[in-house]
Image: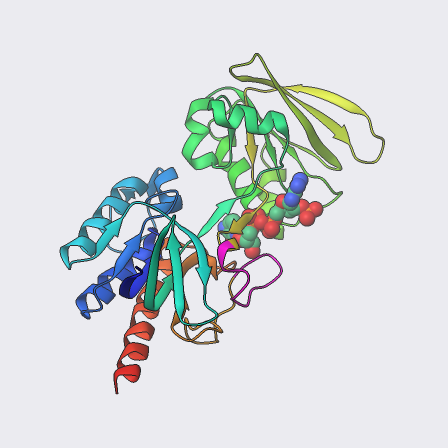
Amino acid sequence: MAEKIKCLIIGSGPAGYTAAIYAARANLYPVLYQGIQPGGQLTTTTDVENFPGYPEGISGPDMMIDLQKQSERFGTDIRNGWITKVDFSNGLKLWADNHELECESVIISTGASAKYLGLESEKKYLELGGGVSACAVCDGFFYKNQDVVIVGGGDSACEEAHYLSKLCKKVIMLVRKDNFRASKIMQERVQKTNNIQILFNTSAVEIKGDGQVVTSVLTKNNITGELNEIPATGFFVAIGHKPNTDVFKPFLEMDETGYIINKPGSTKTNIQGVFVSGDAADHTYRQAITAAGTGCMAALDAEKYLASKEN
Ligand code: NDP
């Protein structure tokens, strides 16, 4: 038999926990499924220095523990697990593995994940923890005074390359076209940094290693087809993010990347009773504080929706 839930929250980043704090305090008895990465993207960050209220900064994982504790304090039912199936065709039915949930309202806070190139060798060394990363701020420290390669030509790649340049001996940036996508100011910053070398029209085709750790990156010039092997111990990928929304695709309106479309000025989706907060709907700001803000909005929208149903 399906479990009846008044307010289901999916995801445990700043958006999900903030929604939980507000929903619990409004007596919506929220149940929160933490998802595949409890705590979300901030658990892979070191210091968070731009979240208001922490004058000395706080580590990402510590902040997520605090947010979890705060949402538990008001009675949120936090569960380990994730939503594997959804049916919004007749009511709001969801499944956490085989456990069926029948919900009166749903807040989606599933966030986004870093994209990878999809190379076999990239996957191999990522899984081995041997030199492939999508987060310079999290892992740059391990490559102190070493040579690293970073892929991407957007603001993230420039920001991460600049961050790495302060730790590493040399940073080689691979940009697949003959131009950056990044803003002018970010482009100039990397161009002016002595130990960043930019290779335009260049793609990574294979990550080479000794079976444990990365030792070099095989690159291809996209104009001439010329191959080149660059010695490096770290391979960073900064080619954007993908929202974790696949499971909702048959029912919710999304843009071509998979970001859920919310009604302007609210967290409402095209399905009544389903609300979205955080990076699952935001490709512009993508900050912990904006995610928390929309988490609060989603809980308030859910509260209002549930109250209107009762009247
Ligand atoms: P973007 O989508 O802006 O850029 C992605 C970059 O990766 C592009 O250069 C793209 O190349 C490249 N790329 C994509 N797929 C591949 C691939 N398979 N192989 C090689 N290269 C690939 O993502 P970002 O994460 O950089 O930025 C996302 C948003 O966040 C943007 O709006 C950005 O402005 C913002 N942001 C702002 C920051 C700031 O202002 N401080 C910092 C970080 C992000 P191509 O151009 O050829 O498609």
Position of 67 with respect to 228 (left or right) is left
Image location of residue 187, percent across then percent down? 62, 45
Observer-nearest residue: 130 or 168?
A: 130
Residue at image coords 18%, 69%: 27
Position of 212 with respect to 225 (left or right) is left
Residue 144 falls in image quadrant = top left
Residue most toward the right? 224
The boundaries of the magenta stretch are 247-259
Residue most toward the front? 1
Residue 256 falls within the magenta-colored stretch: yes
Residue at image coords 49%, 55%: 247
Confirm whether residue 294 shows in the render: no
Observer-nearest residue: 25 or 10?
A: 10
Image quadrant in which the N terminus is located:
bottom left
Confirm whether residue 218 shows in the render: yes
Position of 154 with respect to 268 (left or right) is right
Observer-nearest residue: 59 or 269?
A: 269
Position of 99 with respect to 137 (left or right) is left
* Relative vertical location of residue 226 with respect to residue 28 in this rendering, above or below: above
* Relative vertical location of residue 95 with respect to residue 89 in this rendering, above or below: above
**Magenta segment, prevailing SS (helix, strand or loop):** loop
Image quadrant in which the C terminus is located:
bottom left
Residue 9 falls within the magenta-colored stretch: no
Residue 65 falls in image quadrant = top left
Residue at image coords 31%, 62%: 8
Image location of residue 19, percent across then percent down? 29, 62
Image location of residue 241, percent across then percent down? 53, 48
